[in-house]
Amino acid sequence: MGWDVTTLSRRDDGFDVEDPSSVESSLAALDTRFSLILIAVGILAPEGAQPEKSLSAIDAASMAQVFAVNTIGPALILGHVPRLLSREGRAIVGVLSARVGSIGDNRLGGWHSYRASKAALNQIVHGAAIELRRSHKSAICVALHPGTVATPFTARYSTRHKTVTPTEAAQNLISVLNGLTPEQSGRFFDWTGGEVPW
């Protein structure tokens, strides 16, 4: 399935998810109805910082910035989705999360700010799906785990997980979204289409 694409990015458009007025002005300027909206923002840690390996390493300012980008920013964007999402035919909202945001799957601890911000994001996505269902009966709104994507960012961290290219990751997620039904809205899926526990 082909998609018309409009991209808002911090680098190109000045779109800043940490600034509510930037989110408001950027999204208020859109007057198109979309059949697919992907929210793909996030940071592991602020620039110059590292993800915490222990609770004693938590820094309040760093944690607040991680939540601002990973949780509050996407929540502000989701607030505009009912106006932007098509009410006719298939309409999908996919929000990039991370498996480490799964409370049920956490066996290692650490990365507290990142994990907590993604767990909070998952709750927001679930609530958004419930709210969206009231006005868009056929809409699908889900959290997505893309797997480990091979980027300069992930190259800095050792991983035992297989990596995929950004193009492969995007294709995998589009394939998952294409296979979902409205009954699956509000859930959390990985790049294989498998459901991730909350």
Image: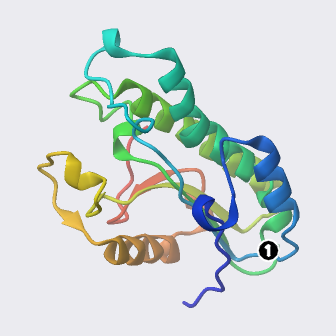
| Residue 133, picture quadrant | bottom right
Q: Is residue 55 above or below residue 1?
A: above
- Measured as percent of width and height from the top left, residue 22 is found at 77, 50
Q: Is residue 63 above or below residue 99?
A: above
Look at label 1 and name its amino acid: Ser
Q: Is residue 75 left or right of residue 154?
A: right
Q: Which colour scheme is used?
A: rainbow
Kindly state the secondary structure of the residue where label 1 is placed: loop
The residue nearer to you, when weighing 30 against 119, is 30
- Can I make out residue 127 in this image? no
- Measured as percent of width and height from the top left, residue 169 is found at 35, 70
| Residue 194, picture quadrant | bottom left
Q: In this view, does 89 lie to the left or right of 51?
A: right
x 47%, y 75%: residue: 174
Q: In which quarter of the image is the C terminus?
A: top left
Name the residue furthest bottom. Answer: 2
Name the residue furthest left. Answer: 160
Q: Is residue 85 above or below residue 80?
A: below
Q: How crowded is mark 1: few (under 14 residues within 10 Å), some or many (20 or more)?
A: some
Q: Is residue 45 above or below residue 184?
A: above
x 42%, y 73%: residue: 170
The residue nearer to you, when weighing 75 against 35, is 75
- Measured as percent of width and height from the top left, residue 197 is found at 38, 41
- Can I make out residue 56 in this image? yes
Residue with the mark numbered 1: 86
